[in-house]
Image (cartoon, rainbow, N blue to C red):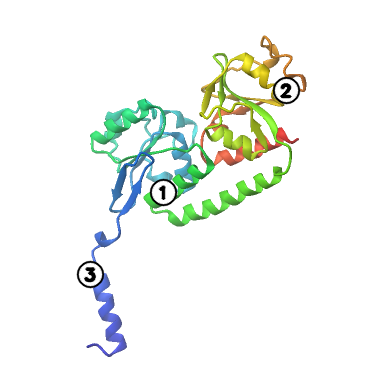
Amino acid sequence: MLKNPVALLLFFWLVLSRTPASAAAPIIVIDDTGFTVELTAPAKRVIPLYGAFSELLLALDAGGLLVARPAADAHLAELAALPAVGTHMRPNAELIVARKPDLVLQFAGRQEAQTQTEALRGLGLNVLTFSMDSFEEMFAVLEKLGRLTGREARAGQLLREWRARLAALQDRYRGQKPVRVFYEARYPNLLAAGAGGMVNEVIVAAGGENVVRENKKLARVNEETVILTDPDVYVIQKGPMNPNPSPPATRPHYKDLRAVRAGRVAVVAEERFARPGPRALDAVEELGHILHP
């Protein structure tokens, strides 16, 4: 038995130094479809198929791990030079496989996206699918990405900061009468933000009340619905889904809306309001100023 303290320390050092690196605990993550990915080490080559994941990874200082990007992320300077591999609805499997990712991130959505996910998994790729229809879901995804990329400390820091900021914004409007909001996602062929997505979370956190109660991300509505709900504020998103929205005052039947008569029509950026990610908190702050000038 070793009684000399120096010899004892040397013994433990030798034991630890000979422990193989592979003995480290694996990283196990279960996605929102019940699919499990087990990594023996933090991911080194990551492909996000939806821009929200790109922005979360950049916030984690993990941009250097990205080896490809969704087609829609060309505007992000940090990712512009990366090859595009399609969209989450139509990913290019050949291009993805060629980049040899150890992790692919997919956004939960319509069945078509899940079909593509299964096809990629059939090629031997680790594909995790996540929903982000609320701030809590987004925070949970951030925590998992921190573990998957070995950035747990950074994820913890961001979570504390983002939760505190969201709570402060919610407190700012708590106790005030909610402002009734209609959020236009597309016109014509009118689509509105429903009660089941991130846009609704932004509206509520900013002291608003979504007049469209259907529990979907996007709800198909008609002009009669808009007239009957007669919102206090009419918000129009501008972006790929709604590239050239006409002013409501120029549309048939819209000129008598309360929001139009009061001049309470606002145009906001689609990618900031409809895309889950760090900028969703900016969207809450922006909308709060619109609803409560």
- Circle 3 or circle 2, nearest the eye: 2
Q: Nearer the viewer, residue 20 or 64?
A: 20
Estimate the spatial distance between the alpha carbons at disc 2 and disc 1, rounded to whole Å. Answer: 41 Å
The quadrant of the rendering that contains the N terminus is: bottom left
- Circle 1 or circle 3, nearest the eye: 1
Crowding at dot 2, Cα within 10 Å, few <14 / some 14-19 / many 20+, comes out as many
Q: Which mark sits nearer the N-terminus, 1 or 3?
A: 3
Residue 65 is situated, as x and y percent measured from the top left of the image, at 38, 45
Asked whether, in this view, residue 47 is left or right of residue 80, the answer is left
The quadrant of the rendering that contains the C terminus is: top right
Estimate the spatial distance between the alpha carbons at disc 1 and disc 3, rounded to whole Å. Answer: 30 Å
Residue 7 is situated, as x and y percent measured from the top left of the image, at 27, 85
Instruction: Identify the image quadrant of residue 189.
Output: top right
Residue 10 is situated, as x and y percent measured from the top left of the image, at 27, 80
Residue drawn at x 67%, y 34% as measured from the top left: 208
Task: Provide the residue designation for mark 2.
Answer: 259
**Could you tell me which secondary element the residue under label 1 belongs to?**
helix
Task: Provide the residue designation for mark 3.
Answer: 18
